[in-house]
Image: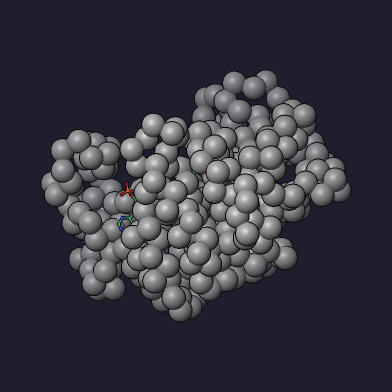
Amino acid sequence: MEKRIISGTDLEVSVICYGPMRIAQSQDDPDLPVHLRAMHAAIDHGINFIHSSYEYGVRWMMHEVLKDHPERHNLLHVIKAPVPDWDDPDFDAAKLELIIDDALRDLCTDRIAMVQWMWRCRPHDEEHRLPLLANIHDKVAETFEQLRQKGKVGHLACFPYFPESAATAMAHPAEEALIAYYNPLEMEMSPVIDTLNDDGRGFLAIRPLYEGVLTDRYASHADVPEGHRLAKEKYADAFNARQKLAEAIPEAADGMTRFAIRFPLMSANCASVIVGLNSEEQVVEICDHVAGVTPDPDTVSRVRALMGH
Ligand SMILES: NC(=O)c1ccc[n+]([C@@H]2O[C@H](COP(=O)([O-])OP(=O)(O)OC[C@H]3O[C@@H](n4cnc5c(N)ncnc54)[C@H](OP(=O)(O)O)[C@@H]3O)[C@@H](O)[C@H]2O)c1
């Protein structure tokens, strides 16, 4: 598995980051053995970067895999830390530390390599998010520095949801990397990504396969079997955009899964893609597809132009 440095940090991470959001939440899940094999396979294939959140309800399974895994001290963890959360009145330093402490224990590690900090509020729009950010950002940075001094965390990254939030958040000197949804159908963060590239900072791309739409499994929404999560009406537009991509970009038509997983890595400052891997077969295929990706500004520009970015 190839590795990249997250620009501006000392973290050398595999270009695939294992994302466990859709794995078993309990012992009773009939897919548990498949998911356990997938996580073991991910580590066996050289994935050293693991994304997680207490919100997914899957840390119990991760703990089972990690508690006496021989590689556990070589793994780098990036964890979600939403403080303040939707209904919190303010940033709470103690809450952030508790989230870190829980993750250190559950993931059997001495340090969280990267914290994906996010701030939430209602209504969930720029008008309310930006003033809140202005009020709390220095406090967040100060708290993070204290946690770093304690040895609990390595680097601060931000998941800002929206482009203006992203541009404003990343202007703060404490923010070391951006974490955002980024795939051929979701490129709203492109201007911020370019700015970060210019000043030597990197980003991590979440959901490179658009939750499974950008794969070879189903060419159109009509092909998705009834009852499958992708059959929901909310995915119809994404399948239309998938078709547009396949018609305009020959590499995508030749292999959608391969193209989509490689696409974020064609940007020089993308260190890793955070992808959901739920079976050993998915791990093997995805790891195979990312061999030898090099920066490819021409393809990035073609896709951006096609999708109006
Ligand atoms: N999506 C979000 O809103 C979100 C939010 C916060 C964080 N994250 C993080 O990002 C990670 C990835 O997000 P995501 O899982 O939503 O999106 P994704 O990585 O774009 O899509 C992953 C899905 O694609 C399918 N897949 C994987 N490999 C495949 C292959 N080789 N061939 C065909 N299909 C394949 C799997 O579907 P099946 O297993 O169902 O077949 C898998 O669940 C999460 O695990 C989480 O850590 C996501």
Left or right, 38 with respect to 135, comes to left
- Identify the residue at horizontal 37%, vertical 49% (top origin): 34
Image point 70% across, 25% down: which residue? 90
Q: Nearer the viewer, residue 87 or 16?
A: 16
Q: Residue at x 63, y 40 (%)?
A: 106
Q: Is residue 84 above or below residue 105?
A: above
Q: Is residue 9 above or below residue 30?
A: below
- How many numbered marks, from 0 up? 0
Q: Position of residue 217 (x, y in %)?
A: 22, 56
Left or right of 260 in this view: 272: right
Residue 136 visible in the picture: no
> Residue at 28% of width from left, 73% of height from top?
251
Nearer to the camera, 21 or 67: 67
Q: Position of residue 288 (x, y in %)?
A: 39, 71
Q: Position of residue 276 (x, y in %)?
A: 42, 51
Q: Nearer the viewer, residue 210 or 190?
A: 210
Image quarter for residue 146? top right
Task: Give residue 98's quadrant in the image.
Answer: top right
Decide which of 37, 237 is in the foreground and name it: 37
Q: Is residue 139 left or right of residue 190?
A: right
Q: Position of residue 6 (x, y in %)?
A: 64, 64
Quadrant (top left, top right, bottom left, bottom right) of the C terminus? bottom left
